[in-house]
Image (cartoon, rainbow, N blue to C red):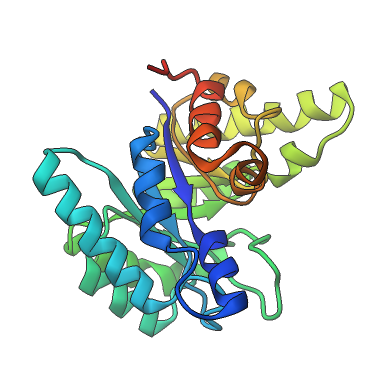
C-alpha cells in the first residue's frame, strides 16, 4: 500500500495569518490520522511563515503519545533545507524520516532538486548523522538517472520524486511523457535498493496513475488536499486521497 503523509503546513499558514492558535494544528493532525493517514509531514522554513519550531516539537510529542497509547505507527516526516538549526532540531526530535530539500531564496514553494554531483559532499555527513540517529533520509529528486545513482552513493535511503512537471502536463502526450520519466526513475531507484516517495501538486485527478509507479512507498500531499478540504471537509478529503491511492476505505 502506498502511504499517504499529509502535509499540515497550510493549517499553520491560516493560523499565522490571524494570530492566536486557530485553527489548531494538532486538531488537524488528529483529523488526518482518524481519517486513515499513515503519516504527517511538516516543512519548517527559516522564515517560519507556516510551521514553527514549537509546532515541530508539539506534533512530535503528540504522535509519540498516539503511537504509544494506540500501538500504531503514524510516521513523522520533517522536510527542509539542511541548515544547521533545522538539522539540530531534527536530531533532537528524531522523526521517522527527514526529507532534505534545496531551498531557493524567496521561493513560494520548493521547486528545485538536488544536484548530487555539486552538493553530495555537503550532504553526505549530514545524511550520516541523521542515519546514526535512526532517522530515515530521503532526498528531493528529479528524474535524472545519474543523479539518482549518486543519491545512493552518498547514503540516502529514499528519493522523493518531484512530481510538478507531471502534475502540470496538459495533453495526453505530455502526461504520458512525464509519467514515463517518473517510471524510469522509480525503476532505477528499485535497482539501487532505494525507496521512492513522491510529492508536489499531486491531486485527486493525477494521483490514481501514481499507483503504477514502480516501487512507490509514500506520497506527501498538502496544498491540494487542504484546498479540497475547504469544500468537502478535512476528514472527507483525506479519505478521498486515500481512495485515489487505492486504499480500501471503511
Position in image of residue 154 (x %, y %): 38, 58
> How many callouts does the rendering have?
0
Q: Nearer the viewer, residue 64 or 89?
A: 64
Residue at the image point whose x is 69% and y is 29% from the top: 206
Residue at the image point whose x is 77% and y is 23% from the top: 176
Position in image of residue 8 (x %, y %): 48, 56
Q: Is residue 90 left or right of residue 69?
A: right
Q: Is residue 85 left or right of residue 115?
A: left
Residue 107 appears in the rendering: yes
Residue at the image point whose x is 71% and y is 46% from the top: 164
Q: Quadrant of the N terminus?
A: top left
> 33 above or below 210?
below
Position in image of residue 12 (x %, y %): 51, 67
Q: Is residue 150 left or right of residue 132?
A: right
Q: Nearer the viewer, residue 114 or 109?
A: 109
> 62 above or below 227?
below
> 40 above or below 57?
above
Residue 116 appears in the rendering: no
Position in image of residue 171 (x %, y %): 89, 27
Residue at the image point whose x is 27% and y is 43% from the top: 74
Q: Quadrant of the C terminus?
A: top left
Q: Residue furthest right?
A: 171
> 143 above or below 113?
above
Q: Quadrant of residue 5?
A: top left
Q: Is residue 214 left or right of residue 133?
A: right
Amino acid at each position: 500500500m502506498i502511504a499517504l503523509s499529509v502535509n499540515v503546513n497550510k493549517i499553520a499558514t491560516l493560523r499565522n495569518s490571524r494570530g492566536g492558535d486557530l485553527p489548531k494544528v494538532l486538531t488537524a493532525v488528529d483529523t488526518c490520522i482518524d481519517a486513515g493517514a499513515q503519516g504527517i509531514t511538516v516543512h519548517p522554513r527559516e522564515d517560519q511563515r507556516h510551521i514553527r519550531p514549537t509546532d515541530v516539537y508539539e506534533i512530535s510529542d503528540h504522535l509519540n503519545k498516539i503511537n504509544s497509547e494506540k500501538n500504531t505507527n503514524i510516521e513523522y516526516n520533517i522536510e527542509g533545507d539542511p541548515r544547521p538549526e533545522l538539522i539540530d532540531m531534527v536530531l533532537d526530535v528524531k522523526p521517522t524520516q527527514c526529507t532534505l530539500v534545496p531551498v531557493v531564496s524567496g521561493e513560494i514553494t520548493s521547486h528545485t532538486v538536488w544536484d548530487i554531483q555539486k552538493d553530495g559532499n555537503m550532504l553526505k555527513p549530514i545524511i550520516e548523522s541523521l542515519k546514526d540517529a535512526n532517522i530515515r533520509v530521503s532526498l528531493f529528486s528529479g528524474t535524472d538517472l545519474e543523479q539518482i545513482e549518486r543519491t545512493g552513493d552518498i547514503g540516502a535511503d529514499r528519493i522523493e520524486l518531484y512530481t510538478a512537471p507531471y502534475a502540470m502536463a496538459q495533453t495526453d502526450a505530455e502526461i504520458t511523457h512525464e509519467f514515463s520519466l517518473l517510471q524510469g526513475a522509480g525503476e532505477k531507484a528499485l535497482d539501487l535498493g532505494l525507496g521512492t516517495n513522491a510529492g508536489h501538486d499531486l491531486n485527486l485527478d493525477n494521483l490514481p496513475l501514481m499507483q503504477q509507479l514502480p516501487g512507490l512507498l509514500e506520497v506527501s500531499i498538502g496544498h491540494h488536499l487542504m484546498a479540497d478540504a475547504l469544500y468537502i471537509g478535512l476528514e472527507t478529503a483525506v479519505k478521498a486521497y486515500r481512495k485515489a491511492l487505492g486504499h480500501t476505505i471503511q
